[in-house]
């Protein structure tokens, strides 16, 4: 430490000697060294701010702008270093460039303003700094860069201006180096936006960077703000226009059975919907029908008709033989025995009228009573047989007819009365049998009506009365005579056989030589004789 101080004293002493001796030497020969000049009395050191570039000069020179000398005796001026300037002559020091300016070379007489896009935030700067991304300077001489305001960005260094965010993007904070894309559900439709706008109900945006929202297409809806997608209308609802904020329920009479429907479908015949928002139509229940499309209710089948299956578009008329007497019937009812229906759509069965009957179910017509039977009232399931003593000769009779005088019927269901045979008579109406003539008498014709018709006429007399041809008459009379002779001898069997032979001959000639009526008389008389012999 002591040796360092001693060295400083020695250097200072030498400098003092030089300062004393140099002027003396120069004075001795009137020639001053460089850095000094002759001031007419001695060699004087150049003042600070001045210089003397060579020996033997008689004046000092001021430092030019851009240079300075800070000490006496300078042989040259010093150039202002970078970051400083000298804007006057005879300067003794360089001046630091102010913030916002700089000098990048030696010897500057003025500082340069930081150009747009740059800044200088300190004194004595040798260079301007580029504004960082996210900032800019739009004027020269900036001491700081300005942050890009919301809605703008700077993505490079050295920017002189911020760029507006393009439509579809935004920046919400200062100093952005890039804009943010509008997220799904939002949009930006202008330049320089500081925020994205939420899509309104009825619209959506499904991708980032949208400049406009898309309307919900038909069949979809958006019921909130800021939607990234449209929602499908659920079954039972639809939307027919774009931009819907809600789906419309299918109105009564229609249905929607799919998602994302753009229209409701009318219920088909046989189906209906009575309320809104149906995803399917209801089938018409049994006993009901729907004849048109778009029905809101099913109609009950009218009397005379029915529907036996669900979903009917029309009721079925009751077929012939059946009837429906109520509304909303699910089946037709068969007509009971005694009744019928001949046409379709009957609301009641018709009773079989008098003279007819119906003996089965589901009949389509009444049947006429057969001859021998009748029905006197309506609704009969069977006809009544004509009772004994009566007859029914025709079909469809409403009453039996009593056998007239001379006739009888001995069995039920007769289609005709039997004439009283020869030897018999019927004297009352509605007789069930004929009355025999007294023994030894007979009637001369069938259908005799009284006892007085019985006569004592013999068989031989009857043969002669007919006027037969001689051969036939003779043969028949011979048989009568032989029968009478055998009877007289007490040979009844021979008499009966002869009478039977008589009858056989008469039957052989019936319709030939003997008329049928005459044959009946002869046969009756012969039979009476046989009966009397027995």
Image (spheres, rainbow, N blue to C red):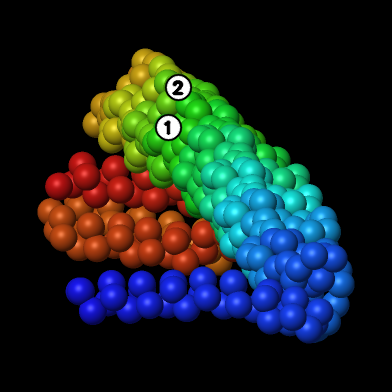
Q: Earlier in the sequence, mark 1 or mark 2?
A: 1
Q: Residue at x 44, y 73 (%)?
A: 13
Image quadrant containing the N terminus: bottom left
Q: Secondary structure at mark 2?
A: loop
Asked whether the residues under the numbered discs 1 and 2 touch, taking CB atoms below 8 Å apart as contact, a structural biologist would say: yes
Nearest to the observer: residue 387 or residue 456:
387
Nearest to the observer: residue 332 or residue 102:
102
* Dot 2 alpha-carbon crowd within 10 angstroms: few under 14, some 14 to 19, many 20 or more: some
Nearest to the observer: residue 62 or residue 126:
62
Q: Residue at x 52, y 59 (%)?
A: 510
* Dot 1 alpha-carbon crowd within 10 angstroms: few under 14, some 14 to 19, many 20 or more: many
Taking 84 as reference, is 220 above or below it?
A: above
- Residue 313, how many percent across, how many down? 56, 41
Q: Is residue 137 visible?
A: no
Residue 446 quadrant? top left
- Residue 162, how many percent across, how many down? 71, 53
Q: Residue at x 37, y 15 (%)?
A: 428
Marks 1/2: CA distance?
A: 8 Å
Q: Secondary structure at mark 1?
A: loop
Which mark identifies residue 217? Answer: none
- Residue 514, how many percent across, how many down? 56, 56
Q: Is residue 190 visible?
A: yes
> For this view, does 256 lie left or right of residue 490?
right
- Residue 266, how many percent across, how many down? 62, 40
Q: How many marks?
A: 2
- Residue corresponding to mark 2: 327
Which mark identifies residue 287? Answer: 1
Q: Residue at x 20, y 74 (%)?
A: 2
Nearest to the observer: residue 170 or residue 250:
170
């Amino acid at each position: 430490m002591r040796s360092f101080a001693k060295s400083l004293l020695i250097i200072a002493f030498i400098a003092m000697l030089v300062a004393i001796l140099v002027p003396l030497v120069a004075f001795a020969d009137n020639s001053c060294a460089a850095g000094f000049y002759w001031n007419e009395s001695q060699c004087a050191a150049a003042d600070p701010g001045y210089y003397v570039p060579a020996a033997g000069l008689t004046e000092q020179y001021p430092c030019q702008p851009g240079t300075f000398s800070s000490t006496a005796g300078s042989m040259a001026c010093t150039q202002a270093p970078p970051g400083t300037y000298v804007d006057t002559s005879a300067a003794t020091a360089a001046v630091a460039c102010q913030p916002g300016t700089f000098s990048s070379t030696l010897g500057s007489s003025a500082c340069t303003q930081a150009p747009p896009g740059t800044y200088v935030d300190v004194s004595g700067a040798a260079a301007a700094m580029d504004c960082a991304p996210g900032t800019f300077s739009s004027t020269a001489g900036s001491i700081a860069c300005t942050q890009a305001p919301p809605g703008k960005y700077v993505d490079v260094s050295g920017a002189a201006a911020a760029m507006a965010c393009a439509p579809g993007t935004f920046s919400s904070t200062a100093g952005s180096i890039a804009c943010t894309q509008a997220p799904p559900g939002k949009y930006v439709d202008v330049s320089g936006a500081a925020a994205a706008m939420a899509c309104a109900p009825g619209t959506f945006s499904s991708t980032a960077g949208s400049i406009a929202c898309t309307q919900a297409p038909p069949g979809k809806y958006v019921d909130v703000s800021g939607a990234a997608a449209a929602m499908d209308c659920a079954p039972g609802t639809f939307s027919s226009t774009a931009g819907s904020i809600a789906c419309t329920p299918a109105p009564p009479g229609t249905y929607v059975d799919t998602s994302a429907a753009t229209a409701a479908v009318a219920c088909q015949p046989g189906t209906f919907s009575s309320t809104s928002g149906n995803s399917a139509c209801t089938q018409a229940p049994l006993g009901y029908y729907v004849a048109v499309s778009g029905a809101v209710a099913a109609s009950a089948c009218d009397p005379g008709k029915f529907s036996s299956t669900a979903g009917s578009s029309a009721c079925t008329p009751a077929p012939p033989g059946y009837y429906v007497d109520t509304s909303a019937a699910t089946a037709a009812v068969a007509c009971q025995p005694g009744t019928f229906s001949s046409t379709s759509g009957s609301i009641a069965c018709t009773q079989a009228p008098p003279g007819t009957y119906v003996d089965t179910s589901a009949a389509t017509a009444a049947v006429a009573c057969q001859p021998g039977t009748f029905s006197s009232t309506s609704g009969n399931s069977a006809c009544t047989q004509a009772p004994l003593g009566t007859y029914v000769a025709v079909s469809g009779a409403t009453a039996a007819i009593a056998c007239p005088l001379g006739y009888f019927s001995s069995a039920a269901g007769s289609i005709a009365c039997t004439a009283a045979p020869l030897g018999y008579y019927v004297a009352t109406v509605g007789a069930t049998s004929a009355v025999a003539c007294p023994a030894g008498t007979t009637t001369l014709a069938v259908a005799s009506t009284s006892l007085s018709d019985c006569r004592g006429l013999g068989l031989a007399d009857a043969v002669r009365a007919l006027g037969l041809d001689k051969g036939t008459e003779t043969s028949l009379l011979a048989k009568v005579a032989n029968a009478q002779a055998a009877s007289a001898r007490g040979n009844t069997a021979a008499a009966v056989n002869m009478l039977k032979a008589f009858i056989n001959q008469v039957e052989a000639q019936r319709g030939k030589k003997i008329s049928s009526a005459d044959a009946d008389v002869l046969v009756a008389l012969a039979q009476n004789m046989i009966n009397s012999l027995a």
